[in-house]
Image (cartoon, helix red, strand yellow):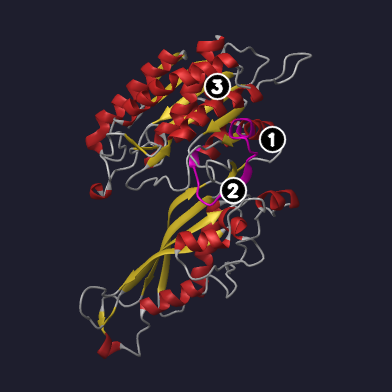
Amino acid sequence: MISTALEEYLTAARVRQLLELDELLRFPSISTDPAHAEDVAATAAWLADHMRAVGLENVRIIPTRRHPLVYGDWLHAGADQPTLLIYGHYDVQPVDPLGQWHSAPFAPEVREGKLYARGAADDKGQTFIHLKAVEALLATEGALPVNVKFILEGEEEIGSGSLLEFVPRETDLLAADAGLVSDSHILSPEQPSLLYGLRGMWAGEVTVTGPATDLHSGSYGGVIHNPNQALAELLAALHDEDGRITVPGFYADVRPLDEAERAALAQVPYGEAEILSESGAPALWGESEYIPVERTGARPTLEINGMWGGYTGDGFKTVIPSRAGAKISCRLVPDQDPEDIGRKLTDYLQALAPSTVTVDVRAIHTGQWFITTLDAPALQAAAAAYEQVFGRAPVYTREGGGIPVVALFQQALDIPMVLMGFGLPDDNLHAPNEKLDVGNFYRGIATSIVFMQELAAPAEGGDRS
């Protein structure tokens, strides 16, 4: 619970905390652009200094082949208390198109209770929440209720390459009893939500090849199988009329939703009306035996993300193209294996291919799914923290996208991961006018404090309060 001393501290610190976040957001730490490499390094240095200032120990900047990691800890709660590993990333997406921003992306501005800047929600602002929680506890109580480790990276927006190498190599350094990531959103300021599952990924490219070169359709139409048509026929065969994926064995390893999960997901106030409003689509499509929130987070998908072939410029060019292609991505759920799905998709497309064309499938990207059981103690501690601070119990959700580092931590360190977000669905992540609700920033600090208190093992003969 938030003591009187903590409440007074947090109230008095509000203006300073927001100004400090403003300073962090001014760094143009765009990880994908080599021109900003020094800005990324400067952000890491600023964070290391700030971690020391709030009371973390053993703070160090860890060089990598690209952008540095930042580590710090506080480990004086005792061996009988759990250790919490807090992850965040300080790199940001490019700001294009710059002309659509209403204020400069690296000159933070508060408008109507929203803080606008690149990185405000993804992920500097949400990461900073936990540093301020640690600061408040150490300043008022002189100790944290649990042992805490921070690992912050500067490559999340470009695939976390250095972290993917670092974590399996440094399991002793990062050893913990639970992990915490705040890089997601809740449903609204009035309705918190806990994300307990993320889908994995197989993504690749399909190329259909026919004649050795583009041909005149007047001379060869009717005798040469057009690769555009052959590709369309193959792609159309990947789903049946009810939206189910037809790849043999695609669903073989899908972990069924149990009744407890279906009941929890049914409580999420998000469905057909919201999806149609957001998307502008005329009607829903897909597996009708599952409600929309199950289809978007707990069921696997196969999507055609792009198609090309032949002439698509102005005017007209009557050709039969030599090649046609498509980008395909599969969102995967427990217990599907990305490599296995890639093989099954490849085998199916090649088995369907007529003798008139050849088909090549090339994998581009894979990612692992993540899930935490609803009764996991760390997840329940987060639920209790949300309810105390927001005044309303969270609903439980599964996300359609993925955060690869979450599965990495869970697998390499064998710990449950808690995804406790404080963003909102309309925060414009990766887009112009990214923002963070200032009220959520302050509520997030309080929630982080209560989460650590709830996670702590009760003293002998005592309770968590």
Q: Which amino acid does label 3 sit on?
A: Asp
Earlier in the chain: of badge 2 and badge 1, it is: 1
Residues packed near mark 3 inside 10 Å, few (<14), some (14 to 19) or many (20 plus): few
Q: Which of marks 2 and 3 is in front?
A: 2
In the rendered structure, find residue 88 and report the number of the disc placed on it.
none
Span highlighted in magenta in the image: 386-405
Specify which label sits upstream in the sequence, 3 or 1. 3
Task: Give x and y (percent) for residue 148.
Answer: 55, 20
Asked if labels 1 and 2 touch by Cβ distance under 8 angstroms, the answer is: no
Is residue 343 something one can see in this rendering? no
Residue type at mark 2: give it. Arg
- Location of residue 99 with respect to 392 vertically, above or below: below
Dot 1 falls on a residue whose secondary structure is loop
**Label 1 sits on what residue type?**
Ala
Q: For the point 57% across and 74% down, which residue is it?
A: 240
Which quadrant does the N terminus fall into? top right
Q: Name the residue under label 1.
A: 376
Outermost residue on the right side: it is 461
Report, in whole angstroms, how far the alpha carbon at label 2 lies from the one at label 1: 15 Å
Q: Which of marks 3 and 1 is in front?
A: 1
Residue 398's disc number: 2
User: Circle 3 sits on which residue?
Assistant: 172
The answer to which of marks 2 and 3 sits earlier in the sequence is 3
SS state under label 2: strand
- 352 in relation to 258, above or below: below
Q: How crowded is mark 1: few (under 14 residues within 10 Å), some or many (20 or more)?
A: few
x and y percent of residue 287 in the render? 61, 66
Percent across and percent down for residue 81 are: 65, 17
